[in-house]
Image (cartoon, helix red, strand yellow):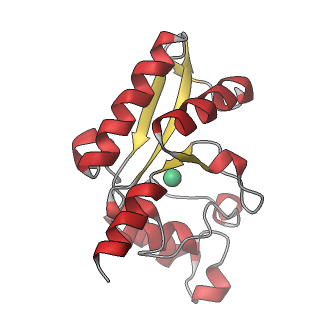
Amino acid sequence: MASRKLEDLHPVTREKAKAFLQRAKEIGIEVLIYCTYRSPEEQEVLYAQGRLEQVGWTLEELNRRRLKLGLWKLTEKEARRKVTNARAWQSFHQYGLAFDCVPLAGGKPDWDNFEAYEKLGEIAREVGLEWAGNWERFRELPHFQDIETFQKIVRRGK
Ligand SMILES: [Zn+2]
């Protein structure tokens, strides 16, 4: 199971996440961050969802791997739905540079609150994060990532 701890984020991204939560609170949006770091093994299992034939796994194989990672079993219908376009090491979650969050209404996740997500998208821009709710291809409302820090790391690595 992926981490939801802010401590598992890159230190720079962690500070941005804190500022993000603070500003959201200031405008009256309570937010739950439910995923920060995600292992490459778990990413690969998510990638396989909706692509079992392509990766050559049966539903049983997918569920065996999911249970090992602390994830619940999927039905055949659920297993047909794509949830990500990123393979292992292709997601910012494997580098502690992304988090997924959901606005809360009365303490419960409010997944379809597009209005709240739009506001969170604005806050993200202010604190230097990118919101996947703006993406043309495979829009992901809950996903926020720190492309600035990613680019700094890549430049330093050269
Ligand atoms: Zn994400």
| Residue 6 appears left or right of 111 | left
Quadrant holding the C terminus? bottom left
Residue 132 position, x and y percent, is 63, 50
Name the residue located 60 percent from the left edge and 64 percent from the top edge.
84
Return the residue nearer the eye: 37 or 82. Answer: 37
* Quarter residue 22 falls in: top left
Residue 102 position, x and y percent, is 54, 32
Return the residue nearer the eye: 133 or 60. Answer: 133
Name the residue located 35 percent from the left edge and 53 percent from the top edge.
2
* Quarter residue 119 falls in: top right
Return the residue nearer the eye: 52 or 120. Answer: 120
Name the residue located 54 percent from the left edge and 16 percent from the top edge.
29
> Where is 124 relative to 110, above or below?
below
| Residue 106 appears left or right of 65 | right
> Where is 107 relative to 125, above or below?
above
- Is any atom of residue 117 visible in this view? yes
Residue 146 position, x and y percent, is 44, 52
- Is any atom of residue 5 visible in this view? no
> Where is 106 relative to 153, above or below?
above
Name the residue located 33 percent from the left edge and 56 percent from the top edge.
96
Q: Residue most toward the right?
A: 136
Quadrant holding the N terminus? bottom left
Total labels drawn: 0
> Where is 33 relative to 77, above or below?
above
Residue 145 position, x and y percent, is 48, 51
